[in-house]
Image (cartoon, helix red, strand yellow):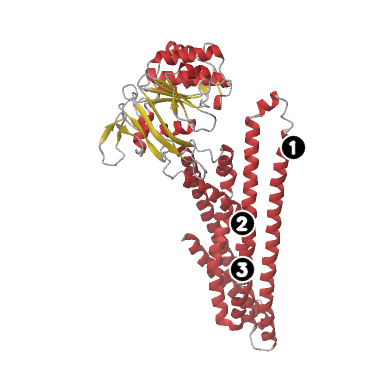
């Protein structure tokens, strides 16, 4: 509405400007006197000042709208990522590109294209109406020629949209390539293959440069075409007006009024075509962002930040009746996965098909199978990050399948989870260990998010997980920088151990917990797991883990041994 108001004011000021210029110039030529020229100049100065104010207001409103939209989209993108933390369809590099440079390109849409689009819908109509009262022939020429600009603009716009989409894809591929290269640079250096990656990186960079130059070429050529159309259209009006003035059919003041207004009729429409290129990058990024956000709103979205208050892990039932239910602890209740099947969107076949297993209190069950058989998918379903297409997840008599997010949060408070790549925060090892007691089923997160434990307790847990050589006060950086892959797993295992022994969790869910550990450390970890007396579900390829398990469930044939 505000942009529409500034468009109307702009059109009115353009009319005033044309009328004042026509009156003042025709008066000088008619009377050959400049006595009242100062007054005309003051009025024109006021009109110019008004146009400057409306231009500033339009730009301020558009930048404000752009900032609000970008902020909301970035928040929605991060929320979508947190809602589906296991979604691998969008890499971190792609997400970073979208959140930063991708959405920044929306400034071109809101600060340049959208204001011009509003002006193009208002100003030409108002000015053409004013011209029509003075010369019917001129307004007919304008009515015939002005649609040519949107037609050519649409043809060029389709080509530009394709080029911009391709450019965003190449830019995203470059970001992913660079991210993968940086994450594996240490390994490449060890095997002497770091410099060999320069060729591929330069090729991707060259493709990005080529697409950028192709887009710029289209932009410059389209501007030339639109300028040419507008110039020829104005020339047609000017020629007819010139003939009529020469024949005495129109006075000088009216002719000047029409000639001054005619370019202003075409200007907003021409600028829309020119500014479309400023918006294409942002719109391509916005479409990519919407696709990520829409995926997070599918039924598989069951996760979210834990905000469940209370120490008992209570939650509302999935049926929405408002009845409070108790989520049983795996310390006392049997966990059953019955016929779990899950197919990722767009996948030709299910990633997990008909998995059935049971974990009794105090039992250690191993989930085995070749890579890609669906072991991690099964854990994601168990944790509530994915909703199975078929099957049930039972803890005691409670069916978690289809439960509401609060129930899943309460269930996750009962678990201690160690993924394949454990997450560690910047700080000391002791700080990261204490995170195992945060927001647990036995600890209300709204009153005491982290439980303080004596250093000797932390030391004991770390030692039992093979971390005897790791000092508690050792500083680590973001993403566990400063620790090896094996040390990272030791810290994560100790944190999970703290969660079951001091945080109220009743079950450990482990995804390849001993990968990268030596045989001695692996034996220490397995001895610790056997001595716990808590339920353990572990995914592993390691023969020693499978040998020490009470039961092994193999995904290929889903046969217990």
Q: Which of marks 1 and 3 is nearer the N terminus?
A: 3
Depth check, front residue: 411 or 450: 411
* Mark closer to the observer (1, 3): 1
List x then y, in percent, for residue 422.
51, 26
| Above or below, 87 relative to 520 | below
Depth check, front residue: 163 or 408: 408
| Disc 1 element | helix
Residue under circle 1? 199
Residue under circle 2? 161
Residue under circle 3? 151
The quarter of the picture where residue 232 lies is bottom right
Q: Which of marks 2 and 1 is nearer the N terminus?
A: 2
| Disc 2 element | helix
Q: Residue at x 52, y 27 (%)?
A: 420
- Residues under labels 2 and 1: Cα distance? 30 Å
Depth check, front residue: 365 or 297: 365
């Amino acid at each position: 509405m505000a942009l529409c108001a500034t468009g109307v004011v702009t059109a009115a000021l353009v009319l005033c400007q044309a009328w004042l210029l026509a009156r003042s110039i025709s008066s000088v030529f008619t009377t050959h006197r400049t006595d009242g020229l100062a007054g005309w100049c003051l009025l024109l100065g006021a009109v110019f000042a008004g146009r400057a104010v409306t231009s500033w207001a339009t730009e301020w409103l558009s930048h404000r709208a752009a900032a609000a939209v970008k902020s909301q989209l970035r928040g929605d993108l991060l929320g979508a990522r947190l809602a589906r933390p296991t979604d691998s369809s969008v890499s971190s590099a792609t997400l970073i590109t979208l959140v930063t440079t991708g959405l920044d390109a929306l400034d071109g849409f809101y600060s340049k294209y959208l204001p011009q689009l509003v002006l193009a819908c208002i100003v030409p109509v108002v000015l053409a109406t004013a011209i029509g009262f003075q010369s019917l022939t001129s307004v007919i020429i304008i009515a015939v020629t002005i649609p040519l600009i949107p037609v050519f603009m649409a043809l060029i716009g389709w080509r530009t949209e394709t080029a911009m989409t391709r450019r965003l894809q190449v830019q995203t591929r470059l970001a992913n390539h660079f991210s993968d290269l940086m994450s594996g640079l240490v390994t490449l250096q060890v095997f002497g293959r770091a410099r060999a990656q320069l060729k591929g990186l330069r090729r991707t960079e060259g493709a990005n440069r080529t697409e950028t130059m192709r887009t710029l070429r289209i932009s410059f050529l389209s501007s030339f075409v639109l300028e040419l159309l507008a110039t020829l259209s104005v020339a047609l009006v000017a020629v007819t007006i010139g003939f009529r003035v020469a024949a005495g059919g129109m006075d000088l003041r009216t002719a000047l009024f029409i000639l001054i207004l005619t370019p202003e009729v075409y200007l907003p429409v021409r600028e829309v075509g020119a500014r479309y290129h400023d918006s294409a990058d942002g719109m391509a990024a916005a479409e990519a962002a919407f696709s990520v956000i829409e995926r997070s709103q599918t039924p598989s979205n069951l996760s979210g930040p834990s905000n469940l208050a209370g120490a008992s892990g209570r939650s509302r039932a999935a049926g929405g009746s408002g009845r409070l239910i108790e989520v049983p602890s795996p310390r006392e209740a049997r966990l059953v996965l019955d016929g779990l099947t899950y197919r990722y969107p767009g996948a030709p076949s299910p990633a997990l098909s008909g998995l059935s297993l049971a974990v009794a209190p105090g039992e250690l069950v191993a989930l085995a199978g070749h890579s890609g058989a669906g072991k991690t998918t099964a854990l994601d379903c168990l944790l509530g990050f994915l909703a199975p297409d078929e099957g049930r997840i039972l803890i005691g008599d409670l069916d978690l399948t289809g439960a509401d997010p609060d129930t899943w949060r309460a269930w996750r408070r009962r678990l201690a989870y160690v993924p394949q790549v454990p997450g560690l925060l910047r700080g000391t090892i002791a700080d990261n260990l204490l995170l195992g007691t945060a927001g647990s089923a036995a600890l209300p997160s709204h009153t005491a998010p982290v439980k303080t434990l004596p250093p000797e307790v932390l030391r004991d847990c770390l030692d039992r997980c093979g971390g005897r050589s790791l000092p508690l006060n050792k500083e680590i950086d973001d993403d566990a920088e400063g620790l090896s892959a094996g040390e990272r797993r030791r810290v994560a295992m100790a944190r999970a151990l703290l969660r079951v022994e001091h945080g109220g969790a009743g079950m450990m869910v482990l995804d390849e917990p001993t990968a990268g550990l030596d045989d001695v450390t692996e034996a220490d970890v397995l001895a610790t797991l056997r001595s716990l007396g808590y339920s353990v579900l572990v995914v592993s390829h390691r023969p020693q883990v499978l040998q020490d398990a009470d039961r092994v469930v193999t995904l290929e044939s889903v046969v217990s041994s």
